[in-house]
Amino acid sequence: MGLFSFIKNAGARVFGIGKTTAEEAAEAEAEKASKLSQAVEALGLHVEGLSIEVDDDKATVYGEAENQATREKVVLVIGNTEGIASVDDQMTTAVQEPEAQFHTVVSGDSLSKIAKKYYGNAMKYPVIFEANKPMLTDPDKIYPGQVLRIPALEA
């Protein structure tokens, strides 16, 4: 009889079995959101009512963080994940505090070089290291493209 051509994804719509491309994409995004939530929780970052939605390469995060530092760390955990290009922060904080600055690591950066740029003192690098725990486990393990929190120095 020969070779017949068919519309590849029409079967799921006609017979009600299988999944359409849109359904598969929605499931994949839901799985990414679940894994991002698990990553946040595994780092011990507490957000009441944490909810993350993924739409292609954009993640939207909801909930109430216990403080500004936790809020910013959650954004960084999500944003420093492969496949996520932007994070829409819709969280609130239980305690209002000033926002930190953010720095995108470039080739040749070190925490001491970054500390010199923001604080005028390279020896203040532990402040940046502490501000990015638990995402950072070693002050020498940063990589280009990574975004770091740079908190204001306490008086």
Image: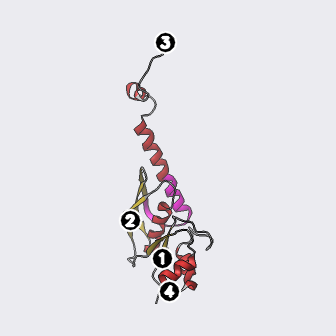
Q: Mark 2: which secondary structure?
A: loop
Label 2 sits on what residue type?
Answer: Met
Q: Mark 4: which secondary structure?
A: loop
130 relative to 52, above or below: below
Q: Mark 1: which secondary structure?
A: strand
Q: Which residue has dot 1 on it?
A: 150
- Mark positioned earlier in the residue sequence (4 or 1): 4
Q: What residue is shown at x 47% (from left), y 85% (from top)?
A: 153
- Mark positioned earlier in the residue sequence (4 or 2): 2
Label 1 sits on what residue type?
Answer: Ile
Q: CA distance from mark 4 to mark 3?
A: 76 Å
Q: Which residue has dot 4 on it?
A: 120
Q: Which residues are magenta?
A: 34-50
- Mark positioned earlier in the residue sequence (2 or 1): 2
Q: Residue 46 or 86: which is nearer the viewer?
A: 86
x and y percent of residue 89 in the render? 38, 63
Q: CA distance from mark 4 to mark 1?
A: 13 Å
x and y percent of residue 96 in the render? 38, 77
Q: CA distance from mark 4 to mark 2?
A: 32 Å
Q: Which residue has dot 3 on it?
A: 2
